[in-house]
Image: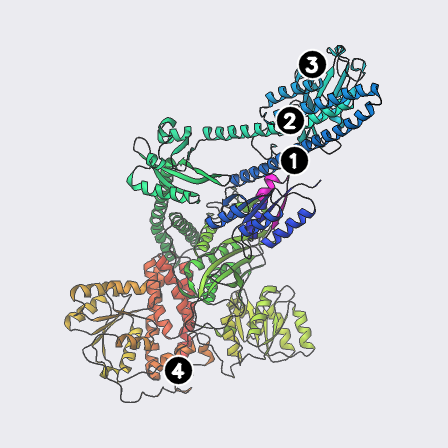
């Protein structure tokens, strides 16, 4: 038999599934749970259930749904199933919708989202019980009406029979007397039955009802003997039994006597569900016992039944263990022929003193009486349930540890539980009848707030707040307050207010926060204090390694330095973790190149990966923006941490970093993977992206049983004392928190023995118009070139193919050298070959030698994870010449430079990093806007460049090498404008500006324009706060400098130019020193060089002078940087790197400038990670720049 259904309706699938799951756990045993995502679908389900004859006791519907609102659905559902109880879910109390549902759909109750699960379960339970109680009562009323109607019909029928009988009796006198007697008895029975019906309906106490039932039954049949058995569950065996609840006459003994099913007359009536008469009971062989039964001659038993077989209050649905009928707890309870469940047996008996027997009339009379008795019993049980329910909830309130107060419509206290007395100090006698807000919120600063809460509750809105209330003694307490309106049957009765004392919780929370901050402050202080001497130890050991040492001494010293580096890394982790716990980590937000950040992180781990023979690779999806806004230092920190772990736990194979993106629409919650995006509109806001970065390795993997250790502070996957891998266990915690601060998250996938992939996401803005790199454009020099790629590593091979295809090349790739040789021998033409060095079947040098034997004449490029010099030496020894060597991890920019150098017979088309307008230098500006200018700049190369630009604008400027000299110059003579560098020795630009503003008022002092190579968030604000008037960035953009000079105040009006502007300088290849030559193009940005020469008026001699100045100063800066790195002087590293970065950018040495920027960032943050190695890498890159600049000088 199908179970009744509960229908849940909500258009939000997650909410619908959650609602269904909560109800399934509580009601799935007794109900089918139906769901619908719209009103129309819900109505269809109701129609189907109605056609199938299934009941729907409860409908739960959300109010706000597209198409059909919840109240509209409930009105239509009411037309289909009027008896079904309706519950409305709403995110906020909608008085109009609720009122409409109450009036039109007979709404049972509404629940406000988010709901409390206990409240939801109790509400649905009460609704189901109400439904079946109403149904039972309706059925009973119908049954009573039917019985009354039947009685009336029977009376009419009997009357007709009497008339006929009287006619016959006139002819048959003997039969007439008997018939009259029978009719008289029937009338007496019917009258007595009618009177009994009226009397039983008003009986609600079960014990009183049982006494009344047996008395009336005995009176009906004219006997003194009878009993009532009810079905109960035996507590010992758990089996159902018949329990004698009442007896009269000879059955008055042994109250509580129990029978099993089929035992004795009562047991057989229970078993069969039919009346049973035994005429000679004293001799009946199947009687249960002989207790005085020799006094019984005739015994009649009839079943007491329950009309509806449903357990409203089983232990699974209500918190009390009271059943409407224990019989309904039986899996297959006995039933009558009409399907009613047998819940008891009513028995009547005649003794030897009576000459009466039980005939058909008596059987029918007692059966009908039993039907009425069954209805009365159900009513009594329901009343008992209601009483127990009331007592249960009263007990809950009385014994609840939280203060529970109810108020009437006038806000006077109606009930006041012991917890309220304990919390507020008022006894129930003192509180009941008082205005609640006046009682517990009498202080001025909380009384208004309390009244607002009461008004909100009165309007139908539940309120939940953390607030304060006052004790009888006047003290204020922290409380968690919940205030809800109370309605019964749609009628407002008042409010219920629940108070939970959280004073101790608030105090404990504040103490915990204070303790946490103290701990974090201690960790930060100690980390700084330990790091200072550690930097000294590391620096001195580095200097010691530069002296003459024995092999043993060098080994000891290197051990000290390595241990110091490891300890410094641990201290830095602890410092970061303390910042995280204290909530002190702040993120920068400035533009940076994602590819450079990723390549920089890979470069740091390249040496360790090479030592272990691991392949490093990365791939950035073509739709991912490369210039983004964010904190490059923290992103690099996450990558370095994940890559370090990957290298640590991987002994063979590869480590691959992949980057994908999806466009995020901030105006909605819908996110989608971004397609190929068109260029942004000029004034369009920056597009927001979610970047998905993954670091995959082929290492040892993580066991499933130890995955829970990840992302836990000071926890490692292997926590044993004999663990193989070291570390603090803080790296992943810090990385995950940083990714979350950047708007993303971090997770891991791993398979033991196969490898691990760490994923993390960040949210960022794409920076429009800063650049689209040439690395994704089809290149004329490369387009159509056929390239052979031989690499046994699938990832590297795929990356090479994708990159070559993006430039219009035609790659053909293979994993085996033998297949490549077979292609060549078959005559497949190629313009270039890219060969991996390390392959299992044949290394790259051997393969190159085999290709050379075929005398095909195309160039070959070697791709290697080993040191380049080692591979070059091996190639020379083998007599094999390569056009170029590339190191792993492969960088697209390096590959591009190499390929362009090889195929250098055509000009290369670059997409500029910035859309730079043609610069027109106005040499008359100095005449039209005369200004006395002081240049405060410590860097000689920058001095010369700035002076040249000013000279071309018609200005002659004085020079100060630092802030002190600028102050001295200003003391000697006044200046209209000072071009002030931010970072200078002795006194920086900010300090100098503050001194100037303190000595000269704004209307008398110079107009100060800041010049800085920094692009940090807040730089402009720092400059303006110090008293500067304007701000230009380095490298200097002429149009920006002209704008700043034009905006400076002057007493001389700026006249219009009368002469035409000079034509832009046309530079021939000979004039610009062949800036596009292969020797310099791979190291120097040709666009930047061309712009620099434009600024210099095309004067090659002046360019050479600037080059000489840079080459003279750069070694000094490198020496200072290297010394600072060795002793751990973060400030020294920052200053030297900043100065070198500025002039590197002037010449387009972007790689050198980027490396300087990374060192500057680390110096500013005080986090020097492998500084000596980085300084060495910087020197190697400078050598490349120096060679390129020297080539440029002599061309």
Q: For the residues labelled 1 and 3, say whether their Cβ atoms are less than 8 Å apart.
A: no
Q: Is residue 1157 left or right of residue 609?
A: left
Which span is picked out in magenta? 21-37
Q: Which residue is mark 3?
A: 224
Q: Disc 1 or 3, which lies upstream in sequence?
A: 1
Q: Is residue 732 visible?
A: yes
Of helix, strand and loop, which one carries label 2?
A: helix
Of badges 3 and 2, the one in the foreground is 2
Q: Disc 2 or 4, which lies upstream in sequence?
A: 2
Q: Residues within 10 Å of mark 2 (few under 14, many from 20)?
A: some
Q: Is residue 15 left or right of residue 738?
A: right
Image label count: 4
Q: Against 451, is 1015 above or below?
A: below
Q: Which residue is mark 1?
A: 142
Of badges 3 and 4, the one in the foreground is 3
Q: Image quarter for residue 1182? A: bottom left
Q: Is residue 724 visible?
A: no
Q: Position of residue 497 (x, y in %)?
A: 42, 37
Q: Position of residue 209 (x, y in %)?
A: 61, 22
Q: Which residue is mark 4?
A: 1194
Of helix, strand and loop, which one carries label 1?
A: helix
Of badges 4 and 1, the one in the foreground is 1
In this view of the protein, which residue sits in the foreground, 147 or 514? Answer: 147
Marks 2 and 4, how far apart at CA: 125 Å
Of badges 2 and 4, the one in the foreground is 2
In this view of the protein, which residue sits in the foreground, 1082 or 1109? Answer: 1082
Q: Quadrant of the N terminus?
A: top right
In this view of the protein, which residue sits in the foreground, 1119 or 416? Answer: 416
């Amino acid at each position: 038999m199908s179970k009744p259904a509960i229908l849940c309706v909500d258009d939000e699938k997650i909410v619908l599934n959650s609602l269904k799951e909560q109800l399934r756990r509580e009601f799935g045993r007794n109900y089918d749970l139906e769901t619908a995502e719209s009103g129309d679908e819900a109505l269809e389900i109701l129609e189907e259930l109605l056609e199938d004859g299934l009941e729907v006791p409860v409908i739960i519907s959300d109010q706000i749904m597209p198409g059909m609102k919840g109240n509209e659905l409930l009105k239509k559902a009411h037309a289909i199933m009027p008896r079904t109880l309706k519950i409305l879910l709403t995110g906020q109390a909608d008085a109009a919708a609720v009122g409409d549902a109450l009036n039109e759909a007979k709404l049972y109750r509404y629940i406000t989202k988010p709901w409390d699960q206990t409240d939801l379960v109790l509400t649905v339970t009460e609704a189901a019980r109400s439904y079946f109680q109403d149904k039972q009562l309706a059925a009973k009323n119908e049954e009573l009406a039917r019985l009354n109607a039947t009685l009336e019909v029977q009376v009419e029928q009997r009357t007709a029979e009497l008339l006929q009988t009287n006619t016959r009796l006139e002819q048959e006198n003997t039969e007439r007397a008997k018939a009259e007697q029978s009719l008289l008895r029937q009338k007496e029975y019917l009258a007595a039955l009618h009177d009994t019906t009226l009397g039983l309906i008003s009986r609600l106490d079960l014990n009183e009802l049982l006494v009344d039932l047996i008395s009336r039954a005995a009176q009906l049949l004219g006997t003194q003997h009878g009993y009532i058995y009810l079905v109960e569950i035996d507590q010992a065996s758990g089996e159902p039994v018949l329990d004698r609840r009442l007896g009269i006459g000879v059955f008055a003994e042994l109250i509580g006597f129990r029978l099993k099913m089929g035992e004795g007359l009562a047991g057989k009536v229970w078993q069969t569900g039919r009346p049973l008469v035994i005429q000679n009971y004293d001799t009946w062989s199947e009687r249960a016992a002989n207790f005085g039964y020799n006094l019984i001659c005739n015994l009649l038993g009839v079943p007491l039944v329950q009309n509806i077989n449903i357990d409203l209050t089983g232990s699974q649905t209500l918190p009390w263990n009271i059943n409407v009928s224990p019989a309904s707890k039986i899996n297959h309870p006995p039933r009558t022929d009409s399907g009613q469940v047998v819940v008891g047996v009513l028995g009547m008996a005649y003794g030897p003193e009576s000459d009466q027997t039980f005939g058909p009339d008596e059987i029918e009379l007692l059966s009908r009486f039993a039907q009425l008795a069954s209805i009365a019993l159900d009513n009594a049980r329901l009343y008992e349930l209601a009483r127990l329910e009331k007592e249960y909830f009263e007990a809950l309130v009385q014994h609840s540890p939280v203060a529970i107060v109810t108020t009437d419509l006038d806000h006077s206290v109606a009930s006041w539980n012991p917890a309220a007395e304990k919390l507020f100090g008022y006894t129930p006698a003192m509180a009941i009848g008082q205005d609640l807000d006046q009682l517990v919120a009498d202080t001025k600063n909380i009384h208004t707030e309390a009244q607002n809460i009461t008004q909100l509750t009165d309007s139908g809105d539940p309120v939940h707040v953390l607030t304060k209330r006052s004790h009888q003694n006047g003290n204020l307490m922290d409380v968690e307050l919940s205030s809800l309106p109370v309605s019964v049957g749609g009628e407002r009765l008042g409010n219920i207010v629940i108070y939970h004392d959280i004073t101790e919780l608030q105090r404990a929370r504040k103490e915990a926060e204070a303790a946490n901050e103290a701990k974090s402050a201690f960790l930060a202080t100690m980390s700084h204090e330990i790091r200072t001497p550690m930097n000294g130890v590391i620096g001195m050991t580095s200097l010691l390694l530069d002296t003459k040492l024995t092999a043993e001494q060098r080994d000891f010293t290197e051990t000290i330095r390595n241990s110091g580096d490891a300890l410094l890394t641990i201290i830095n982790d602890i410092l970061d973790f303390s910042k995280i716990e204290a909530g002190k980590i702040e993120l920068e937000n400035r533009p940076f190149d994602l590819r450079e950040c990723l390549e920089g992180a890979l470069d740091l781990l390249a040496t360790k990966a090479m030592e272990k023979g691991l392949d490093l690779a990365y791939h950035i999806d073509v739709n991912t923006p490369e210039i983004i806004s964010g904190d490059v230092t923290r992103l690099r920190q996450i990558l370095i941490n994940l890559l370090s772990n990957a290298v640590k736990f991987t002994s063979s194979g590869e480590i691959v970093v992949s980057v994908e993106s999806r466009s995020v629409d901030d105006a909605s919650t819908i996110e989608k993977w971004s397609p190929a995006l068109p260029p942004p509109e000029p004034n369009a806001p920056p597009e927001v992206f979610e970047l998905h970065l993954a670091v995959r390795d082929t290492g040892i993997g993580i066991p499933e049983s130890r995955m829970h250790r990840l992302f836990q502070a000071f926890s490692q996957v292997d926590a044993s004392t004999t663990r193989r891998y070291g570390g603090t266990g803080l790296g992943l915690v810090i990385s995950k928190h940083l990714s979350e601060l950047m708007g993303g998250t971090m997770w891991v996938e791993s398979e033991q023995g196969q490898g691990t992939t760490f994923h993390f996401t960040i949210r960022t803005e794409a920076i429009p118009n800063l650049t689209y790199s040439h690395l994704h454009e089809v290149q004329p020099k490369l387009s159509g070139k056929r390239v052979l790629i031989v690499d046994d590593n699938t990832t590297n091979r795929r990356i090479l193919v994708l990159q070559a295809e993006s430039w219009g090349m035609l790659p053909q790739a293979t994993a085996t050298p033998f297949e490549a040789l077979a292609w060549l021998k078959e005559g497949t033409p190629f313009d270039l070959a890219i060969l991996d060095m390390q392959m299992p079947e044949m290394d790259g040098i051997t393969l190159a030698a085999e290709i050379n034997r075929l005398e095909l004449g195309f160039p070959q490029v070697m791709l290697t994870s080993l040191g380049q010099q080692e591979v070059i030496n091996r190639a020379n020894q083998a007599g094999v010449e390569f056009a170029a060597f590339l190191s792993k991890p492969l960088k697209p920019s390096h590959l591009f430079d190499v390929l362009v150098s090889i195929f250098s017979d055509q000009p290369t088309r670059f997409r500029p990093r910035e859309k730079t307008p043609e610069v027109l230098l106005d040499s008359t500006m100095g005449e039209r806007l005369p200004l006395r200018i002081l240049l405060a700049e410590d860097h000689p190369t920058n001095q010369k460049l700035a002076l040249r630009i000013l000279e071309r604008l018609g200005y002659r400027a004085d020079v100060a090498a630092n802030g002190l000299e600028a102050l001295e110059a200003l003391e000697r003579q006044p200046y209209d404008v000072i071009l002030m560098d931010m970072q200078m020795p002795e006194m920086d630009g900010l300090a100098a500006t503050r001194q100037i503003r303190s000595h000269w008022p704004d209307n008398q002092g110079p107009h100060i324009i800041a010049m800085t190579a920094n692009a940090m968030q807040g730089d402009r604000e720092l400059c303006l706060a110090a008293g500067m008037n304007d701000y230009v960035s380095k490298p200097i953009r002429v149009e920006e400098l002209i704008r700043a000079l034009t905006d400076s105040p002057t007493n001389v009006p700026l006249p219009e130019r009368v002469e035409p502007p000079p034509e832009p300088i046309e530079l021939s290849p000979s004039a610009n020193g062949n800036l596009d030559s292969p020797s310099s193009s791979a190291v120097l940005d040709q666009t930047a060089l061309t712009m620099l020469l434009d600024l210099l008026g095309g004067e090659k001699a002046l360019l050479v002078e600037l080059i000489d100045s840079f080459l003279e100063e750069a070694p000094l800066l490198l020496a200072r940087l290297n010394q600072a790195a060795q002793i751990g002087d973060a400030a020294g590293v920052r200053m030297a790197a900043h100065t070198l970065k500025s002039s590197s950018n002037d010449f387009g040495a972007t790689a050198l400038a980027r490396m300087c920027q990374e060192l500057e960032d680390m110096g500013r943050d005080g986090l020097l990670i492998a500084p000596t190695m980085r300084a060495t890498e910087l020197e190697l890159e400078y050598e490349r720049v120096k060679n390129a600049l020297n080539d440029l000088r002599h061309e």
